[in-house]
Image (tube, helix red, strand yellow):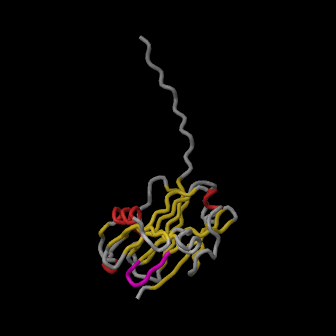
Amino acid sequence: MNKVDVVVVLRHVGVEREIVALKAKGYNFYAFPPYAKKPFGSVDVHMSWHESGERHAAVRLNGRQGSHEAAFQKNSIVKLCPPSDLRGVVELYHSGVMNIDEFTNSFPIGTNQGQVALLDATAAGFRDAFIVIRVYAVSPGTENQIPIFPDTGPRILHLVKQTIPWFAVEVYQELVKSPVREEPHFAEVR
């Protein structure tokens, strides 16, 4: 039976911050932003994929869902195969884009409980720029099917193999693009 609690920590620009908390219980998989549950106590925000195959986002305040939160969850429902039947890759969570100030002011190690997985962005060549965080469920041996988006620069892929399917955490930045200098176009004069 799957049971795991992992807190993913990113080391970058001289600080270490929690970026996502992962939990699996049976064939129910959860990804929490670092501020969910523990720091605020009364706030539960997560993406989950359940044994039934339903994937959804959930928001609860003080343990309850108001009408707006319930509508949000209902509108986010996607029916997938059950996790036990996965053959490939399913996206579970996307953080959006975090800038360097949001990262450095985020939650330090110890905010959430679980085994710590430390990813070293500095060693991977990350810069002082936006960071993207994605979490996937991956059937063993199919991590090469995780999409790599155009213009992906420095990238870390970390596999949590204590569950089946595995969790795959991807952290990346876009390539630095040099300004394109276009030669002026001159019209022909007749």
Report whether 162 appears left or right of 106: left
Q: Quadrant of residue 131?
A: bottom right
Residue 52 lies, in percent from the top left, at: 31, 77
**Residue farthest toward the top in the current orientation of the protein:** 190
Look at the image and say whether residue 128 sits in the magenta stretch.
Answer: no
Q: How many numbered marks are there?
A: 0
Foreground pick, 86 / 57: 57
Which residue is at a point 51% across and 26% down the rendered structure image? 184
Report whether 66 appears left or right of 34: left
Report whether 118 appears left or right of 190: right
Q: Quadrant of residue 120?
A: bottom right
Residue 2 lies, in percent from the top left, at: 42, 85
Quarter holding the N terminus is bottom left
Quarter holding the C terminus is top left
Look at the image and say whether residue 24 sits in the magenta stretch.
Answer: yes
Magenta stretch? 22-28
Foreground pick, 16 / 53: 53
Which residue is at a point 60% across and 74% down the rendered structure image? 118
Residue 166 lies, in percent from the top left, at: 43, 77
Report whether 120 appears left or right of 1: right
**Residue farthest toward the right in the current orientation of the protein:** 14
Residue 142 lies, in percent from the top left, at: 38, 73
Q: Main secondary structure of the magenta part?
A: strand
Q: Is residue 188 above or below residue 179?
A: above
